[in-house]
Image (cartoon, rainbow, N blue to C red):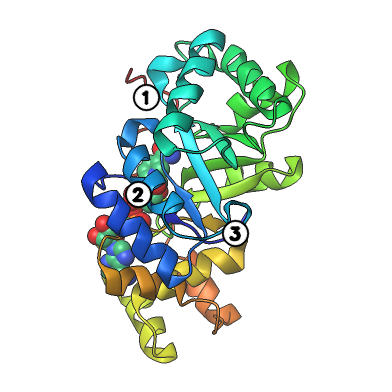
Amino acid sequence: MPQLGFGVWQVPDDEAEQAVATALEAGYRSVDTAAIYGNEEGTGKALNGSGIAREDLFVTTKLWNSEQGYDSTLRAFDTSLEKLGLDYVDLYLIHWPLPAKDTYVDTYKAFEKLLADGRAKSIGVSNFLPEHLERLIDATSVIPAVNQIELHPQLQQLAAREYHAEQGIATEAWSPLGQGQGLLEVPAIVAIAQKHGRTPAQIVLRWHLQLGNVVIPKSVTPSRIKENIEVFDFSLDAEDIAAISALNEDRRLGPDPATFNMA
Ligand code: NAD
């Protein structure tokens, strides 16, 4: 899995083809979508029209909450593949755990079937707390390859990252730039950007990469799409990393997975 990919949340379907095509031209090979984003068709058009060999692309989509359950998952997966115009995805994720609904174990058993059938090359979860992962791992046979969670300098998820590392689960950061809201103006980050002659977004993405996180920044602006992948030709030093790590506030921008139950 490429450590840096392109996220398409909130990109309307009719803009997704252009945005994903721009990302592919800029060198991205991994794209993160979801059934609920409503842009699997536009995303698929860009992937299929890119001329890039399928095996060189890494495509992630996610099962929406309303479709949890064994049979409904298999049906929802077929719909996603059809919209994407693909015959397999590289990674399929359970979007939210919905602990009150308590159907993620059955849902994941359908994921294991999709994996065995080769239609999902890897399977994982999103927004799972360590307690949800523990239960899943006890009740099923394939350890999730990935847990995609909200993670940025103001929500560093230390306990989750430690648990994932123990279990061999990759940590994937959603909203890696803190949705661009304020984080990119934090003085410590601006100062590090000036020191390296880089942008604040590049500094934050580089921090993630050096921590070992997978990142999927989103933008529809071509210059930012390019800027966000130009992060493999410089490094932060220990002092920079420490300064960014000192910004943790355990502050979520998104919902709390323990209580989120939107259908
Ligand atoms: P993000 O942290 O990637 O921030 C995106 C915003 O930051 C953009 O809309 C733009 O306003 C700004 N931005 C981007 N590049 C910039 C740059 N170079 N300079 C200045 N500003 C810049 O936020 P996100 O879109 O919430 O998260 C990224 C991806 O994570 C999503 O597109 C989606 O694929 C995924 N995601 C998953 C979940 C989940 O529940 N699994 C939830 C949210 C997002």
Residue at disc 1, secondary structure: loop
Quadrant in which the N terminus is drawn: bottom right
Depth check, front residue: 62 or 238? 62
Q: Depth-wise, is mark 1 or mark 2 nearer the camera? A: 2
Depth check, front residue: 19 or 251? 19
Q: At x 34% / y 31%, what residue is drawn?
A: 36
Vertical comparison of 246 with 126: above or below: below
Specify whether tag 2 is near ligand 1 (CB below 8 Å).
yes
Q: Position of residue 234 (x, y in %)?
A: 54, 84
Residue at disc 3, secondary structure: loop
Q: Are marks 1 and 2 in contact (CB under 8 Å)?
A: no
> Mark 1 or mark 2, which has the lower sequence index?
2
CA distance separating discs 3 and 1: 29 Å
Residue located beneath label 1 in the image: 260
In this view of the protein, can residue 22 be seen by the observer? Answer: yes
Residue located beneath label 2 in the image: 8
Residue at disc 2, secondary structure: loop
Q: At x 65% / y 17%, what residue is drawn?
A: 109
CA distance separating discs 3 and 2: 16 Å
Q: Quadrant of residue 91?
A: top right
Q: Position of residue 185 (x, y in %)?
A: 26, 71
Q: Which kind of residue does numbered mark 1 sit on?
A: Phe
Q: At x 48% / y 64%, what residue is drawn?
A: 28
Residue located beneath label 3 in the image: 2
Figure quadrant, ligand 1:
bottom left
Q: Which kind of residue does numbered mark 2 sit on?
A: Val
Q: Residues within 10 Å of mark 3 (few under 14, many from 20)?
A: few
Q: Position of residue 141 (x, y in %)?
A: 77, 23
In this view of the protein, can residue 181 be seen by the observer? Answer: no
